[in-house]
Amino acid sequence: MPAIEDAAARTAPPSGLRERKKRRTRDTLIRSALELFDRKGYERTTVDEIAEAAEVSQRTFFRYFANKEEVALAMQTSVDALFLSTLRSRPPAEAPLAALRGAVLATWEGAGEVVESVVPLALYMRTYRMVESTPQLLAARLRALSEMEERLAREIALREGLDPGADPRPHVLVAAFGGVMRVTARIWGERGEDGLEDLRLLTVAYLDQLGPALAGNWRA
Amino acid sequence: MPAIEDAAARTAPPSGLRERKKRRTRDTLIRSALELFDRKGYERTTVDEIAEAAEVSQRTFFRYFANKEEVALAMQTSVDALFLSTLRSRPPAEAPLAALRGAVLATWEGAGEVVESVVPLALYMRTYRMVESTPQLLAARLRALSEMEERLAREIALREGLDPGADPRPHVLVAAFGGVMRVTARIWGERGEDGLEDLRLLTVAYLDQLGPALAGNWRA
DNA sequence: GGCCAATTGGCAGGCACTGACATAATCTCC
DNA sequence: GGAGATTATGTCAGTGCCTGCCAATTGGCC
């Protein structure tokens, strides 16, 4: 059930009845879980409750998701996959940082559809914030992002025709980029704004500060 | 048991017998845990085994550490605290990034002592690598680093006389810096080198790539 | 309809973690 | 140096996450 398979399953047309049913079960589990989390909080929701709401056994839940965290992060995982494929389709002439920046913004354009096919967008946004404020979920999310960065670095190295094992720049760039993305996510979560548009603006503003922030002396 | 208290307890001279005994129990728990983790692996070590090795009840273990992850990361938490205080004692004239860079290197100078007072340095280094390769621990570690970054950003803002809520630069700088630190930790972990010196060299090399990596076009 | 493979449910059990209460060890003050 | 307050520890019972195992059900295919 890694992200790659999810993306494939979501992209490929559902072949038989079996596949379609699995997809439906999975989506139902996600929707049930996120609604319960939203209503009662993550920690006070048990896996049994999620399974019951989705009308499957607890055992089946764990066949779809390795653990409780995974279902909470399922939609973000989908968006991550979308981001990666968006990056791949960026014009090769773009500079690395520009490509990353462009890919984020483009992803958030199309993310709405992907999300809405499973859960209401508003619920997703509340989940996004819940992740930021729930220690266990934040930890899991950060780990997922760390794996994501590894993939991004490889992608950037590929674009630039570099060996990612030899040249540090892809890793360093992606690390800096990822760092900024996390800061904006956190700060956006702390503020009360629900809108995706606020998140976009914040991201752009912060990304544009990367250069100035690294400049030697701010007081000059 | 947050990092702040630990640092205080470790710095302040143990007042009474009670305090000394608590410190000893805590250190014994850490040592027992890290040795077991090193020998049998993190997941295959139970809290009961750790408690037994330290000759306390399981319940007592959980009075010293909120969870199994915490004891695994205890030493890194101490080093983090050392890093923060090292940063505070940096000359105010230093530019932000230079201060961070200087503080890391200085910290690793003094970290040996802090660590050795509880566990052998070699065991600590193996633990460091174990964290990188154990998903659950890595997640917890990344979360701790994220909190650390928040503190660092406040510290940088203080140095520069800025309002961290208004000026994005402290957060952005620290995020980029933290990103690079994580990349070096991961890459160092993937390679086979045990030495702290290798980690130092890698860190310096990667930090120096921050500027070039952000430059518009690498192929120019 | 009937065989094969995949999916699901039910159950038992391990392990992390918590609340409640009793016991034992330190501390304080006289 | 002992009584009483304070704090640390142990024991026990219980909850919830997660897994292995086997039986039952369901969809794919001839």
Image (tube, coloured by chain):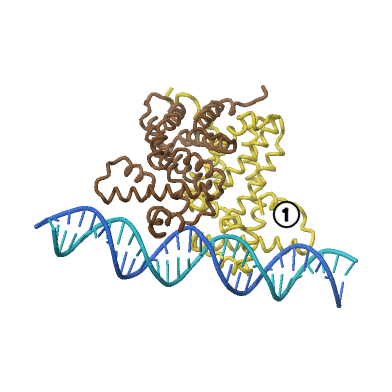
Chain colours: A yellow, B brown, C blue, D cyan
* x 49%, y 63%: residue: A44
x then y, percent, for residue D12: 40, 70
* x 37%, y 40%: residue: B117
x then y, percent, for residue A100: 63, 36
Q: Residues within 10 Å of mark 1 (few under 14, many from 20)?
A: some
* x 65%, y 41%: residue: A106
Label total for image: 1
> Given the image, on which type of amino acid does mark 1 rest?
Ala
Residue A54 lies in quadrant = bottom right
Q: Quadrant of the N terminus of chain A?
A: bottom right
Residues A109 and B16: in front is: B16
Residues B70 and A98: in front is: B70
Q: Chain of mark 1?
A: A
Residues B1 and B93: in front is: B1
Q: Quadrant of the C terminus of chain A?
A: top left
Horizontally, residue A29 falls left or right of residue B137, namely right
Name the element at disc 1. Answer: helix
Residue B120 appears in the rendering: yes
Residues B169 and A169: in front is: A169
Residue A58 lies in quadrant = bottom right
Q: Which residue is mark 1?
A: A9
x then y, percent, for residue A130: 51, 54
Residue A183 appears in the rendering: no
Above or below for B192 versus B29: above
